[in-house]
Amino acid sequence: MSEFIPVLTQKEIAKRVVEVADAISTDYRDRDLILIGILKGAFVFLADLIRHISIPVKVDFMCASSYGRSTSSSGRVKIIKDVDLDLKNKDVVIVEDIVDTGITLTHLVAHLKSSGAASVRICALIDKQERRQTEIVADYVCHSVEKGFLVGYGLDYAEFHRNLPEVYHLKL
Ligand code: IMP
Ligand code: MG
């Protein structure tokens, strides 16, 4: 039987979402901000985050899939859906559910910079440190964990559990 061990309550998540949204609103005042949500995992986080951002902001989405994660062999990332908005001279904040090895974000940051964005920063709901393989550092982080497979609040296991309003460590 799989076990769901509580990691973050709705209240804890909501508190940090407001704090991070405030920080972004301050840092990007008088700038041309575009938030880019990484599908699918970031959709719940982004939906809550954006409602606490108090400056003009545009939203777009990207979808990426990586190969070889289970073997950590290739670390190649394929972009399945690119952004629609013109990023030229815009300040971009990538909104991601969780940073694990960092391979996906390393690739996405390079891709967005090559699209002409003036700046690219990262906002992550969760920074999971144990398996990091790249130098990537998230600029805005709601919560840090050392390890564990997490589900809920957008995070899935085999596409399930995204609907849970809290975050759990799933023990299979
Ligand atoms: P990375 O390239 O290894 O950093 O992969 C990050 C992606 O892997 C995230 O966007 C998630 O989709 C997925 N992922 C990594 N860790 C977890 C987890 O604990 N739960 C659910 N998805 C995860
Ligand atoms: Mg993801």
Image (cartoon, rainbow, N blue to C red):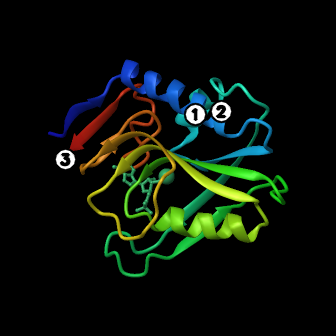
Q: Which residue is mark 2?
A: 26
On the image, the x and y values in percent for residue 94 come to 61, 51
Residue 172: mark in rendering: 3
Circle 1/circle 3 CB separation < 8 Å: no
For discs 3 and 2, the disc positioned in front in the rendered view: 2
- Work out which residue is located at the far bottom of the displayed protein and give it: 74
Gap between marks 1 and 2 measured at Cα = 5 Å
Three-letter amino acid code of the residue under disc 1: Ala
Which residue is located at x 66 percent, y 55 percent? 62
Q: Residue at x 79, y 53 (%)?
A: 90
| Category of crowding for the residue at label 1, using alpha-carbon neighbours closer than 10 angstroms: few (below 14), some (14–19), many (at least 20) | few
Amino acid identity at mark 2:
Thr
Q: Viewed as shown, does residue 164 lie left or right of 110?
A: left
- Above or below — where is 91 with respect to 112? above
103 versus 90 height, above or below: below
Residues at badges 1 and 2 in contact (C-beta under 8 Å)? yes
- Number of the front mark, 1 or 3: 1
Residue type of the residue flagged with mark 3: Leu
Estimate the spatial distance between the alpha carbons at disc 1 and disc 3, rounded to whole Å: 36 Å
Secondary structure at badge 2 equals: helix
Residue 72 horizontal/vertical position (percent): 34, 75
CA separation in Å, label 3 and label 2: 41 Å
Please indicate whether residue 45 sits to the left or right of residue 16 in the image.
right
The tag on residue 23 is 1
Give me the residue at 25% from left, 40% from top. 169
Of the numbered discs 3 and 2, the one sitting upstream in the chain is 2
Residue 42 image-quadrant placement: top right
Q: What element does badge 1 sit on? A: helix
Neighbour class for label 2 at 10 Å: few (<14), some, many (≥20)?
A: few
Q: Secondary structure at mark 3?
A: loop
